Image (tube, helix red, strand yellow):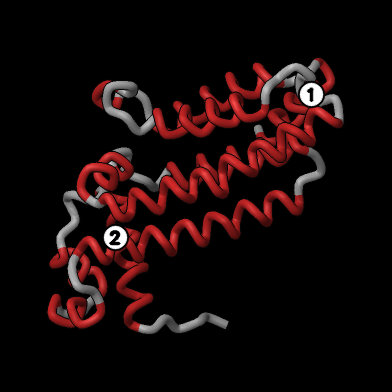
Amino acid sequence: MEVKLNLRDRIVECARGLFFKMGLRRVTMDDIAGKCGVSKKTIYQHFKDKDTVVLEVTKEYLHQEEHDLQKIHESAKDPIEELVSISKWFRDMLSNMDSSLLHDMKKYHPNSWTIFHQHKEKCIFCSLIENLKEGKKLGLYRSDLKEDIISRFRVESTEMMFKSDFNNLGQFHIRDLQLEIFEHFVYGIVTDKGREIFEKYKRELK
């Protein structure tokens, strides 16, 4: 049964769709009102300003992301399948995301950027460390890798894709960048046993 959203939640959903499609800077409150089919005055009854809308969209998105990643963790048969499933989830998300979104957030919406950064530390970084520890125990990852350094590298390399000086003038689709960087990361941490398993998952995805 379809759940009917209240007006505040519907505004957040409409704004999220526009932000993902156009980035944050280009979207106006008029755009959001038009997308939701309400007046701008109605939006201001629920949100102080655009910055508040961005903050609520960020919170809602990060909550959903945490839920999705937890489901992937619980269903994965091994740490490599977890990484592959997260990578696929990430690529699907990037397919519908404007590459300027994180740049706009960092530059124009510091409150949202702060909670995004906190989420990156609490959720992404810590879950990566646990994945690497488990993979080492199972002999899938190199025994000599340092989990904290490798996890930091992975998190930062993911964010690096959104920087204009890395992807000059949008030369590459961000989804393709993500896949290339991901495969480079995995091949750098796996043992021979882990590589066989990783390549099996790659064949299944194709």
| Relative side of 96 to 26, left or right | right
**Neighbours of disc 1 within 10 Å: few (<14), some (14-19), many (20+):** many
Residue found at x 60% / y 60%: 67
Q: Quadrant of residue 190?
A: top right
Q: Report the quarter where the C terminus lies.
A: top right
Residue found at x 34% / y 69%: 12
Residue flagged by tag 1: what amino acid is it?
Gly
Label 1, on which residue?
Answer: 194
Name the foreground residue: 56 vs 72. 56
**Neighbours of disc 2 within 10 Å: few (<14), some (14-19), many (20+):** many
| Relative side of 135 to 25, left or right | right
Q: Secondary structure at mark 1?
A: helix
Residue found at x 24% / y 74%: 47
| Relative side of 82 to 63, left or right | right
The image position of residue 9, as x and y in percent, is 38, 76
Image height of 144 relative to 200, above or below: above
**Dot 2 and dot 1 residues touching (CB under 8 Å):** no
Label 2, on which residue?
Answer: 54
Sequence order check: which comes first, mark 2 or mark 1? 2
The image position of residue 94, as x and y in percent, is 43, 42
Q: Quadrant of residue 165?
A: top left
Residue found at x 14% / y 75%: 40
| Label 2 vs label 1, nearer the camera | 2
